[in-house]
Image (cartoon, grey):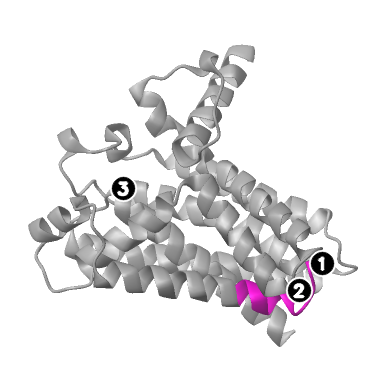
Amino acid sequence: MLKRFVHELRLLLVAVQFLTRVPVPRWVGFEAGWLNECARHLPLVGLGIGAFGALVWAAALQVWPPMVAVVLSMAATVWLTGGFHEDGLSDTCDALGGAVGRDKALLIMKDSRIGAYGALALALMLGLKASTLGGLAQHGAWWPALALVWTHAASRAVAVALMRLLPYAGDIEHAKAKPLALSVRSGAVLVAWGWVLLATLLMVMLSPFADPWARLLPAMLAAGLACALVTMVCARWYRRRLGGYTGDTLGAAQQFSEAAALLAWLAVVHQA
């Protein structure tokens, strides 16, 4: 039992090392297979990333107007992850934005330069997320904080689901993170979404609102449906254009699902 706990803790720390700038203890070590195994804990790391953004939001709100606090919270999460997913978004949009074949698209993804499609996608995505969080802030300071935590977790569970639904589209031998080019097991997807479900239940139980069932739970359910929709759309899109996923397309899916989930949150809260 203890050995299993230590192994899962090691996998969690490997996931932290993979997704963020946070240093991990030396005793964690590294084995190639762990990178594939740790996929089930990516949403848990996402919870931490979202919580960091929420803390920056709360602190900045004491000094600056809400929109400034929103931008600072987004900047904090981008800094913490090193722009990992945003880079994937720009590469994916550069590759799939035009009418090019599969092989050409994969070559474009490997190019470190950013093109018009990638630049537009980044600008629109950051602007959309900032305006959505700003819209949530109009309904109370808690809404952006809770949305940041939940959407950062759920959007990474979307990436894990795509790793199960699709084969790897690129050259496995030259993949940047070769173990992630191997399909994850169904159990990993269940664990990943289990973390999201656990976060949902805890947020409802510890909610600062008098009646969390009225708006908070419906907002999370709507966001969950948005994530499911993005998963299906991305799966079909990536299969049709590339025959599967790459690391960049997983990053793009995280960004798409995060934005979709935020829009769903705002739709429910605003209508209520």
Height in image: 47 above or below 233? above
- The residue wearing badge 3 is 247
Q: From the top left corner, tell me how far across and down residue 260 is, in percent.
A: 50, 71
Asked whether residue 137 is drawn in magenta, I would say yes
Q: Earlier in the sequence, mark 1 or mark 3?
A: 1
* Residue type beneath disc 3: Gly
Q: Earlier in the sequence, mark 2 or mark 3?
A: 2
Looking at the rendering, the stretch of residues picked out in magenta corresponds to 132-141
Dot 1 falls on a residue whose secondary structure is helix
Q: From the top left corner, tell me how far across and down residue 53 is, in percent.
A: 64, 54
In percent of the image, x 70 and y 55: which residue is there?
56
Which quadrant holds residue 251? bottom left
Front-lying residue, 108 or 64 = 64
CA separation in Å, label 1 and label 3: 37 Å
CA separation in Å, label 2 and label 3: 35 Å
Residue projecting furthest to the bottom: 271
- The residue wearing badge 1 is 212
Q: From the top left corner, tell me how far across and down residue 271 is, in percent.
A: 70, 86
| Image quarter hosting the N terminus | top right
Dot 2 falls on a residue whose secondary structure is helix
* Residue type beneath disc 2: Arg
Which quadrant holds residue 214? bottom right
In percent of the image, x 75 and y 84: which residue is there?
272
Q: Nearer the viewer, mark 1 or mark 3?
A: 3
Q: Which mark is residue 215?
A: 2
In percent of the image, x 31 and y 40: which residue is there?
183
CA separation in Å, label 1 and label 2: 6 Å
Q: Is residue 99 left or right of residue 157?
A: left
Asked if the residues shown at circle 2 and circle 3 are in contact, with their CB atoms under 8 angstroms apart, the answer is: no
Asked if the residues shown at circle 1 and circle 2 are in contact, with their CB atoms under 8 angstroms apart, the answer is: yes
